[in-house]
Amino acid sequence: MSSKLIVLDPDIIRLQEEGFEVEVSNGHLLVHSVPYVNSQKEVKRGIVVTNLNGNIGNLGPPSDHQVWFVGDFPCDSTGTQLHAIRHSSGCFKLWEGFEAQHRFSNKISGTNGYPDYYSKMKNYISIISNEARGIDPTATPCTFRVVTSVDEESVFRYWDTASSRANILPVSSKLKFGKIAIVGLGGTGSYVLDLVAKTPVREIHLFDGDLFLQHNAFRAPGAASVEQLSERLPKVVHFAAIYNAMRTGIVPHSEFITDENLGNLVGFGFVFICVDRGEVRKMVSDFLQRQGTPFVDVGMDLQMIPEKLSIFGTCRVTMSTPGKSDHFDRRAPLNADDENDLYRSNIQVVDMNALNAALAVIMWKQYCGFYDDRLKVHHTTFSVNAHSLTRDEMIWVGDNE
């Protein structure tokens, strides 16, 4: 567990200075110890919660006018529920281990929303706590108690406001693998990294022995500068530096996987195989299957049509899991490679690389339960000339899982 100081945003600082118990956690702002009246006309303490949007230090206006509440439904001094703020009640799992019981909705008269988080939180706290003071004049939300914001597991250097705003933090928690590996940081592998880096995986290990050169820049995420290309860094070092700005846990291994170092792939919860050599694919996949490690393998088959001066072909994603692996040798090319293969000539097909990576990451997320998957598809292909997306090697589970 790592303690972090509350972000120095003007709205949050103002709440702190007035004595509110402020906490920032998992992309949400919490105010603790808010006095309220329950249905028995007793004064209790609850928590008002809102999701955060905007940039660190400059949150801007809230994205909505609603909040969550942890506690019983607040009442007035007679024990009658405060219907003016009612929206819905139930079990709202905001993130792993944290639940709210109520959702409130209230706008300041004559406005379309709140201009800042200070106004939003103050309005709800006043509505709720004013009733408590009618019973206990000493009841105040301003305790001046300092709450240290704690983010127990986050790998990100700033809030994942995309997940908190969409209220999918409990779903994202399914992706908190201990370690995953990406073998091969070429066109597809680099896009796999780009997508996986936005998930809460603890460690992402990168395996590739090549340098990051000019031709790589044309089928990789982002835009490399001339200065970066002149450094001739190993691919894994180049990409680790980029994504280190966003998150922790990017571990570069500037080496190709061989018979001698296959043991370096032991202990991973999932592996992405993004290589273009059949013999390497076979070596790595055989090893992972013996270890019982689930993995996804990607590949492309591209060819030129000379008379049309156009390209056709497919991209493929094949998964192997402890529950289903007998199909892999039939679906993934494991033989010696054709030296005239168009794709291996570094043809610029960044869109196909990105699609291949997206299909692979979607399949991984389905395996994790992030996306619903009734079919448990273990093999899919996309044909560019026919606009055809196929699915195969399925485990039908219907509506029961």
Image (spheres, rainbow, N blue to C red):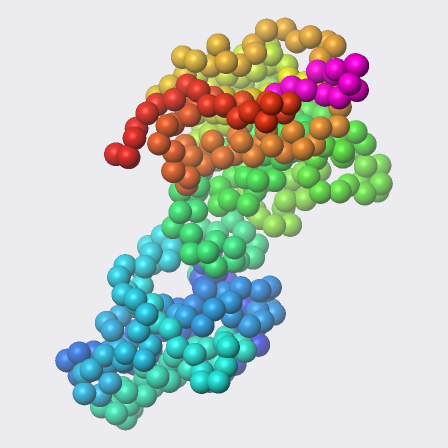
Q: Is residue 90 left or right of residue 113?
A: left
Q: Is residue 291 left or right of residue 334?
A: left
Which quadrant of the structure image shows residue 39?
A: bottom left
Between 7 and 264, the one nearer to me in the picture: 7
Which residue is located at x 79 percent, y 29 percent? 215
Q: Residue 55 magenta-drawn?
A: no
Could you tell me which quadrant the N terminus lies in? Answer: bottom left
x and y, in percent, of residue 106 in the image: 39, 77
Between 305 and 276, the one nearer to me in the picture: 305
Specify start and end residues of the magenta stretch as a single range. 303-315
Which residue is located at x 60 percent, y 32 percent? 355
Which residue is located at x 23 percent, y 79 percent? 81
Could you tell me which quadrant the C terminus lies in? Answer: top left
In the rendered view, tell whether residue 222 sits above or below residue 64: above
Between 244 and 68, the one nearer to me in the picture: 68
x and y, in percent, of residue 249 in the image: 55, 42
In the rendered view, tell whether residue 169 sits above or below residue 13: above
In the rendered view, tell whether residue 201 sits above or below residue 165: above
Total numbered badges shown on the rendered structure: 0
Q: Is residue 213 left or right of residue 49?
A: right
